[in-house]
Image: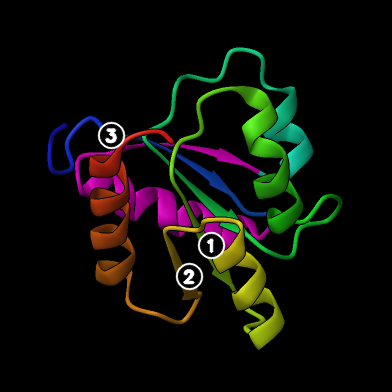
Amino acid sequence: MSTGSHLCVAVVDDDTSVARSLGRLLRASGMQPITYASAEEFLADTERPRFDCLVLDIQLGGMSGLDLAKHLPSLGPVAPFIIITAHDDDESRCTAENLGAFAYFRKSDAGSAVLDAIRRAAATGTR
């Protein structure tokens, strides 16, 4: 797998400004982001490509990012996922870890750290 170019990354975040800025950051790094405003929108996308990595916000309007992570194995081979959140707490961090999150970030964390985690996650492949 390449170190960044042509990686297909799903961004599931209901905060349009965060989704837009993360999408720009990923594109500028040679990745192809596809953004979804909700877990339900992600699940309803029957044309979604095989993603190299998923970036999931915890707090979404309907199903949470953690609930989506629990549901992912039922979809077939699972791309590694990274959790981002504006509301960090020990319980969410522990749940994300138990679900197999590759990494966990606060939305205020550096974009370069998120990019590095996406590249490392994508290099591990599906599980």
**Is residue 72 shown above or below 74?**
below
Image quarter in which the C terminus is found: top left
Instruction: Tell me the residue that label 1 is attached to.
Output: 83
Local packing at callout 1 (Cα closer than 10 Å; few below 14, some 14-19, many 20+) is many
| Mark 3 / mark 1, whichever is N-terminal | 3
Q: CA distance from mark 2 to mark 3?
A: 19 Å
Question: In the image shown, does 38 or 16 lie closer to the viewer?
Answer: 38
Mark 2 touches mark 1? (CB < 8 Å): yes
Helix or strand or loop: what does disc 3 sit on? Answer: loop
Amino acid type at mark 2 = Tyr
Locate residue 38, reporting x and y percent: 73, 45
Mark 2 touches mark 3? (CB < 8 Å): no
**Is residue 123 shown above or below 14?**
above
Q: Along the horizontal axis of the image, is 104 left or right of 68?
A: left
Locate residue 18, reporting x and y percent: 54, 62
Q: Magenta stretch: give its range.
A: 15-36
Locate residue 11, reporting x and y percent: 52, 46
Q: Residue at x 64, y 37 (%)?
A: 72
Instruction: Tell me the residue that label 3 is attached to.
Output: 7
Helix or strand or loop: what does disc 2 sit on? Answer: strand
Whether the magenta-drawn stretch holds residue 95 is answered as no
